[in-house]
Image (cartoon, helix red, strand yellow):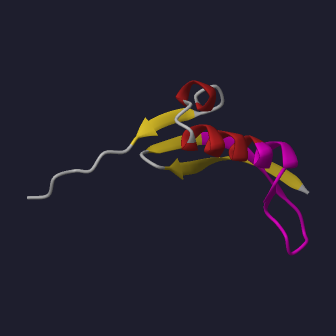
Amino acid sequence: MSNHKTIKYIHEGPYVAEVEVELIESDDSWSPCLSVKDACRLDDIRDALRHGDLATAAKTGRIYEMRPVASA
């Protein structure tokens, strides 16, 4: 079993959160997976973004605002 860090992106409304999580790799068919702690943290960030609470979401990740780009 091994662990490695990766980036997950959570998109909710006009916002995207960039969050570092740890993936757990093993020899079973469920691999790779997140720890319960990381999964709950992603859910909390998604909920904060959904309610516009950017201060809470920004405590554990980078927050970006998506805007449409005018096409030519």
**Residue drawn at (37%, 45%), measured in percent from left and top?**
66
Foreground of the two, 3 or 46: 46
Foreground of the two, 21 or 10: 10
Question: Is residue 10 on the magenta stretch?
Answer: no
> If the image is split into quadrants, where does the C terminus sit?
bottom left
Q: Residue furthest left?
A: 72
Task: Check the image and report above or below for 18 versus 72.
Answer: above
Please provide percent x and percent y for residue 8: 61, 49
**Residue drawn at (56%, 39%), measured in percent from left and top?**
51
Please provide percent x and percent y for residue 61: 60, 33
Question: Is residue 29 on the magenta stretch?
Answer: yes
Left or right? Give the position of 38 relative to 46: right
Left or right? Give the position of 21 relative to 50: right
Task: Check the image and report above or below for 59 versus 41.
Answer: above
Quadrant of res 20: top right
Foreground of the two, 50 or 71: 50
**Residue drawn at (82%, 66%), measured in percent from left and top?**
31
Please provide percent x and percent y for residue 67: 30, 45
Please provide percent x and percent y for residue 10: 57, 49
**Residue drawn at (63%, 27%), measured in percent from left and top?**
56
Left or right? Give the position of 23 relative to 16: right
> If the image is split into quadrants, where does the N terminus sit?
bottom right
Give, as a single range, the part of the protein colored magenta: 19-40
